[in-house]
Image (spheres, helix red, strand yellow):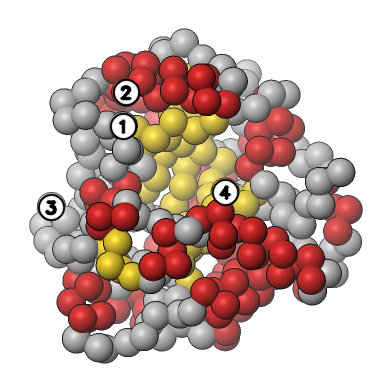
């Protein structure tokens, strides 16, 4: 029997859909207010949008062509026939709403696509977009992933995020008021982050009431502002052992009904500057699991939850995914 210590995405999808579901990474050709000059032209210090370029994407491919290639490969490789279309480049709720609707609708009309996952910034959810997403979430499974990164406003400034933790709080409040399913992206290991900031981030995420969590290590990608700071010796990167320790700390302080979507981040080999260990995803995941087993710990343990809670079906899942 599987030794589950976190609530993982596979079991969540089985819980909701009754079958295995895979996400298909898409390139929607979006942009971002932190790059187009609206907030800044430099972007976040760690960001090179090409690092989230789907491997199979060929320049100019339509959404349908991307799904055709992606779904065919996933079906061949994993024998899965139902998919979530995952828009992850730049800020996928930013832009002309009719154009965004056309992209999302094309994805949802592809055979086997049962839902959408959209990545965005906390400050890119205006009322009109929230109204639109609320309606969309009644028609399909919708997961809105918010780039939180940290709750520490000083680190947010260093990252050139051009939003505050208050924007983040408001974005989750607005999504949940409309019963839209949310997830939080967090970075562990940015210069200035410590055990205390990780604990503060975990407490902050609990307060948002988010349904999903993505943790990823800071990795230095080519052609970013942080690459220059790293090359100038302005900071040192976390070791893999420290990262594993921080991830476990975060998980222990995360409620067991939060779905864990990711525990490590990686960029393509040719774009990765450091750390080299970030390229070995399976090793990191196995090490986290091994260390949790060794310590006999699990998601939510520090909050007083028993290990068996992780296996309990999520309550009120349909209340947040309304199909009326
Ligand atoms: S990380 Fe997101 S918000 Fe920041 S510059 Fe890149 S696309 Fe924009």
Q: Residues within 10 Å of mark 3 (few under 14, many from 20)?
A: few
Q: Nearer the viewer, residue 157 or 21?
A: 21
| N-terminal label among 4 and 2 | 2
Residue name at image x 25 percent, y 51 percent: 49
Residue name at image x 41 percent, y 13 percent: 110
The alpha-carbon separation of the residues under discs 1 and 2 comes to: 8 Å
Judged by depth in the image, the label closer to the viewer, 1 or 4, is 1
Q: Is residue 233 above or below residue 216?
A: below
The quarter in which the N terminus is drawn is top right
Badge 4 marks a residue whose secondary structure is strand
Q: Is residue 283 above or below residue 164?
A: above
| N-terminal label among 4 and 3 | 3
Visible residue check, residue 97 = no
Residue corresponding to mark 1: 56
Residue corresponding to mark 2: 66
Q: Where does the image place residue 100, in percent across and percent down from the top left?
A: 28, 29
Q: Where does the image place residue 174, in percent across and percent down from the top left?
A: 49, 49
The alpha-carbon separation of the residues under discs 4 and 2 comes to: 22 Å
Judged by depth in the image, the label closer to the viewer, 1 or 2, is 1
Badge 3 marks a residue whose secondary structure is loop
Q: Which mark is residue 261?
A: 4
Residues under numbered marks 1 and 2 in contact, where contact means CB atoms less than 8 Å apart: yes
Q: Is residue 284 above or below residue 246?
A: above
Judged by depth in the image, the label closer to the viewer, 4 or 3, is 4
| N-terminal label among 1 and 4 | 1
Q: Residues within 10 Å of mark 1 (few under 14, many from 20)?
A: few
107 left or right of 134 in image: left
């Amino acid at each position: 029997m599987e030794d589950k210590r976190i609530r993982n995405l596979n079991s969540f999808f089985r819980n909701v859909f009754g079958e295995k579901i895979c996400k298909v990474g898409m390139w929607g050709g979006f942009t971002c207010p932190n790059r187009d000059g609206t907030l800044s032209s430099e972007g976040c210090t760690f960001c090179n949008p090409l690092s989230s370029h789907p491997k199979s994407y060929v320049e100019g491919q339509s959404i349908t062509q991307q799904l055709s290639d992606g779904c065919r490969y996933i079906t061949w490789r994993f024998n899965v026939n139902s998919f979530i279309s995952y828009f992850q480049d730049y800020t996928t709720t930013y832009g002309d709403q009719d154009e965004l609707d056309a992209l999302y609708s094309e994805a949802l009309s592809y055979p086997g696509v049962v839902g959408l996952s959209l990545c965005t910034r906390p400050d890119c959810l205006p009322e009109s977009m929230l109204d639109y997403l609320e309606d969309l979430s009644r028609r399909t499974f919708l997961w809105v992933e918010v780039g939180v990164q940290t709750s520490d406003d000083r680190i947010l400034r260093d990252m050139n995020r051009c939003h505050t933790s208050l924007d983040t709080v408001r974005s989750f409040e607005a999504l949940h008021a409309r019963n839209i399913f949310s997830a939080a992206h967090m970075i562990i290991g940015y210069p200035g982050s410590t055990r205390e900031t990780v604990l503060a981030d975990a407490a902050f995420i609990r307060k948002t009431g988010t349904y999903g969590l993505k943790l990823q290590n800071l990795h230095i990608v080519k052609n970013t502002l942080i690459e220059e700071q790293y090359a100038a010796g302005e900071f040192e990167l976390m070791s893999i052992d420290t990262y594993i320790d921080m991830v476990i700390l975060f998980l222990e302080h995360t409620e067991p009904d939060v779905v864990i979507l990711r525990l490590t981040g990686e960029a393509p080999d040719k774009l990765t500057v450091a750390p080299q260990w970030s390229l070995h995803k399976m090793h990191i995941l196995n090490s986290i699991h091994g260390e949790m087993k060794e310590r006999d710990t699990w998601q939510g343990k520090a909050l007083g939850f028993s290990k068996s809670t992780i296996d309990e079906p999520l309550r009120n899942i349909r209340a947040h995914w309304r199909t009326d």
